[in-house]
Image (cartoon, grey):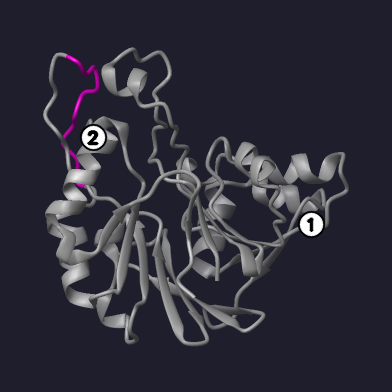
């Protein structure tokens, strides 16, 4: 099973627009918001801004779509479906929503329903919080909030857990299988500002690297962990991230980058 990290960034892109700091000037790659594509299933998870450029560049066929939650850094690229269908008459993909997601999308992202009416995509409500694509079963994992889900992907011989955001709300007692690959959002892990950086670090009640990421890894003991949703506000350069990987090498952590390819199966 081939998994692509299309977008490894957070709610803000890297580099930031109009920012002339050292990190934005010297970091020559880019991070769009969080998004994952699974080749074998032709499955796209989350559509941040800029997703259409990634789909075009990689020449990806999108047959199935999942969302982690409605927040705009995960959904605002939904016009991808319009681009594919308005002129190209692309075969419309199927978007799977469980009840929690269906209710929140109806309220917060009503354009998704409009797009179904325009036949740009098909919306299917799940039964029993799971779907099956080919020989793979995908479970919608309830979280300790009322708006988001994680995904447990079970293929023959391997289990993959994907939490695109809000990992502090994972219900670890619901995870009853060995996890071979864990993909989750990076919790706050700021480097203090210096004269070369203009990014302001802010206090937040969101997930934290030390309190949440490390706790989750210790408890469920995945074979490998890849961290996404990397924010420029944390002022971490690619070198900083490599240093953290080395420091916590016992955890087998990797920080994602746009275009990263994983082959857990």
Instruction: State the extent of the magenta-drawn residues as a range.
Output: 196-205
What kind of secondary structure does the magenta stretch mostly adopt? loop
Numbered circle sitting on residue 92: 1
Q: Position of residue 216 (x, y in %)?
A: 21, 68
Q: Is residue 143 above or below residue 106?
A: below
Q: Is residue 252 above or below residue 265?
A: above
Measure the alpha-carbon separation of dots 1 and 2.
39 Å
Q: How many marks do you count on the picture?
A: 2
Residue 208 can be seen, yes or no:
no
Q: Residue at x 30, y 55 (%)?
A: 254
Q: Residue at x 47, y 37 (%)?
A: 32
Looking at the figure, which quarter contains the N terminus? bottom right
Q: Is residue 151 above or below residue 91?
A: below
Residue contact between numbered discs 1 and 2, judged by CB atoms under 8 Å: no
| Kind of element beneath mark 2 | loop
| Kind of element beneath mark 1 | loop
């Amino acid at each position: 099973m081939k998994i692509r990290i299309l977008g490894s960034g957070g709610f803000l892109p890297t580099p930031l627009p109009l920012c002339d700091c050292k990190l934005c000037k010297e970091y020559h790659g880019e991070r769009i918001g969080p998004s994952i594509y699974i080749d074998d299933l032709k499955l796209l998870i989350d559509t941040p801004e800029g997703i259409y450029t990634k789909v075009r560049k990689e020449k990806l066929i999108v047959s199935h779509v999942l969302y982690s939650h409605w927040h705009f850094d995960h959904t605002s690229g939904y016009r991808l479906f319009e681009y594919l269908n308005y002129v190209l008459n692309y075969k419309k993909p199927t978007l799977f929503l469980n009840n929690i997601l269906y209710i929140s999308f109806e309220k917060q992202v009503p354009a998704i329903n409009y797009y179904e009416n325009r036949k740009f995509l098909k919306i299917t409500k799940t039964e029993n919080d799971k779907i099956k694509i080919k020989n793979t079963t995908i479970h919608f994992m309830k979280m300790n909030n009322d708006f988001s889900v994680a995904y447990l992907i079970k293929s023959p011989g391997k289990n993959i857990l994907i939490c695109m955001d809000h990992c502090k709300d994972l219900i670890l007692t619901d995870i009853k299988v060995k996890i071979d690959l864990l993909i989750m959002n990076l919790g706050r892990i700021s480097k203090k500002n210096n004269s070369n950086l203009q990014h302001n670090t802010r206090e937040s009640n969101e997930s934290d690297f030390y309190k949440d990421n490390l706790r989750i890894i210790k408890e469920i003991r995945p074979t490998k962990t890849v961290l996404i949703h990397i924010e420029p506000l944390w002022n971490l350069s690619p070198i900083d991230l490599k240093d953290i990987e080395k420091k916590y090498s016992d955890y087998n952590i990797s920080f994602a980058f746009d275009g990263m390819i994983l082959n857990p199966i």
